[in-house]
Every structure is written in structure tokens, then in C-alpha cells.
Image (cartoon, grey):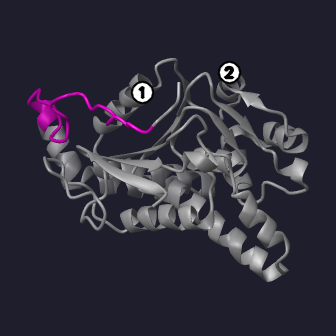
Amino acid sequence: MAIRQDIAGRVLVLTLDNPEKRNALDMATLRELGDVLDGIAYRDPLPAEASDPDIGPGGRFRPHAIVLRSTGAVFCAGADLNEMRALGAADFQANLDAALEMGAVFRSVRNCPAPVIARVQGPCYGGGVGLAAACDVVVAAPEAKFMFSEAKLGLVPGVISPLVIDRIGIAVARRYFLTAEPINAEQALRVGMIDRLAEDLDAAVEETVNAVLACGPAALGMCKALVDGVQSLGYARSAEFTARMIAEARTAPEAQAALKAFQAREGAPWAPAEPWRLPPDNTKDDA
């Protein structure tokens, strides 16, 4: 299997584990990732007090958070070139079907009700940039770099473009789609491709995850839905939607338990007793 799943407390760690191919996104890997995230989307929110949560494969509950990382020096080299060549010899319908399937996986990452934090340790190209852009928070090392290399191959960054444009804006996306220039880590931070740049990558990921774990698991899913709903509706049409969202959250057991704990000067029921730590990846070979 190209994707490993590790449970670390209330967090699911997904690892792209095909360093020989620089973690390229072949269809088997994409399907595996899509199946994992689509399954999580239909699960119940994680109970506040769950100490041994059932969040693994086939589990009942969705994780409090998800970390997406990869082994080796390259985060993701984009689409598998052998499959790209094969599709080039296929007809239009086969290409359309493959593109729709790939796009659906990126949208599964974006729409996952659990926050997804990307750990980007190195280069990230083409579809790999789309995968990172689909995540909620992107934490990257100084060695990370990004490139939309599609135009150099006579292609376009098709199904990833909505995610990328949403992250970095139309003007910046237009420039890098048309020039295929490499974007170093500092530039990526400046344009919004990444959210945090850190020398100590694991420590930064852990700090981000611990911040997420301090928030209510059901509320996190609602926050993601809130952002997408407001963006879709726009300011003028979002009044009732936003009012319904806060009313639903405020009357839910999670908020009631948290408000009660706050009034009693206690921690929220889901607050971890100890700081969360990223499980070691003994196969990694990155900086």
C-alpha cells in the first residue's frame, strides 16, 4: 500500500510512502487516499472524552485532526509520468474520466470535516502542489519548493487550479501557471501557498496540531463548513446561513460542555492531558 495509516492519540497520520517514485500520485495511490478520506467524512464526530478513540481504518469516529506527510526527500512529484504517457495515447473520454477521478480526491481532502495539516519537507510539483493546497494548514521546511510544471509538458494544472487559486489568488496563480517558475519556501509563505515555515518541521507540525486539539472536534468540522458556505454565498446572502451555524453549534452538547467547563475554570473535556507528539517515521530520509 502506498499510504500508511498511524493512529497517534486522537490524530490520524497519513504517510505517502513511495520514495522510490518520489511519492508520485498514481491512480492507485489517489484511490487509496480518496477512500480513506471519503470514509472519514461519513463518520460521527469524535466524542469529547474519548481516551482510546476508534479512528483507524473502518473506525466509527473521525479523527480530531489528520496529518498528511511523506517519506523521502520529496513531498510529492505530482502525477505518475508513466500513467500520464498512457493517458496521452488514450481517447478524450478516458482522459476526462481520469481527470475527474483525480479532482474528486483533491476535493475529498478539502472537504474532509477533520482538519488536515500538511507536513511538506521538500519539493512539491504539479498535482503534489494541488494536494498541499487542498489541506487546511500547510507547514513547510526551508527545503520545500513548489512548481506548476504542467505548461512545460504541454499540459495545464486543470483539476488543481480551483484549490490553488483559492489559496494564492488569481494574479499569483496566473504568473506561476504561465511561467512554471520554481517557488522557494520563502516565496511560498509570502504568497500564501504555505501557512508556516519552520526550521524544526516536526515541532511546528506538533504545535499546529496541539492548537487544533484545543478546539472542539465537532466545531472544527462546522468551521470548515462555515468558511466554504460563506465563500459560496457571499456577504449579502450569508446572514441566515451564519446565524443557523452559530445557533446549531451553541445548542450542541459539545458547546454546552465547554461553556460549563469554562465557567468552572476547567479545561474543555477534549483538552489533551499531555502535548501531542508526531509519531516517528523510521523510513524517512529528509532534512
Mark 2 vs mark 1, CA separation in Å? 18 Å
Residue at point 46%, 50% (across, down)? 224
Q: Indicate the quadrant where residue 133 lies.
A: top right
Q: Are dots 2 and 1 in contact, CB under 8 Å?
A: no
Percent position of residue 102, x then y: 64, 65
Say which label, 2 or 1, has the lower sequence index. Answer: 2
Percent position of residue 244, x then y: 40, 58
Secondary structure found at label 2 = helix
Amino acid type for the residue under numbered disc 2: Glu
Looking at the image, which is closer to me, 208 or 30? 30
Amino acid type for the residue under numbered disc 1: Asp
Percent position of residue 233, x then y: 61, 58
Secondary structure found at label 1 = helix
Magenta-highlighted residues: 261-283
Percent position of residue 194, x then y: 60, 32
Looking at the image, which is closer to me, 233 or 273? 273
Disc marking residue 202: 1
Residue at point 49%, 57% (across, down)? 2
View extreme (front): residue:
20
Is any atom of residue 280 visible in this view? yes
Query: Looking at the rendering, in which quadrant would you find the N terminus?
Result: bottom left
Characterize the local packing of mark 2: few (<14), some (14-19) or many (20 or more) Cα atoms within 10 angstroms: some
Q: Is residue 188 left or right of residue 266?
A: right
**Residue 208 in the image: above or below residue 18:** above
Looking at the image, which is closer to me, 285 or 39? 285
Question: Residue 280 lies in magenta, yes or no?
Answer: yes
Question: Residue 272 lies in magenta, yes or no?
Answer: yes
Residue tagged 2 = 186
**Residue 160 in the image: above or below residue 32:** above
What secondary structure prevails in the magenta region? loop
Q: Is residue 78 left or right of residue 140?
A: right
Disc marking residue 9: none
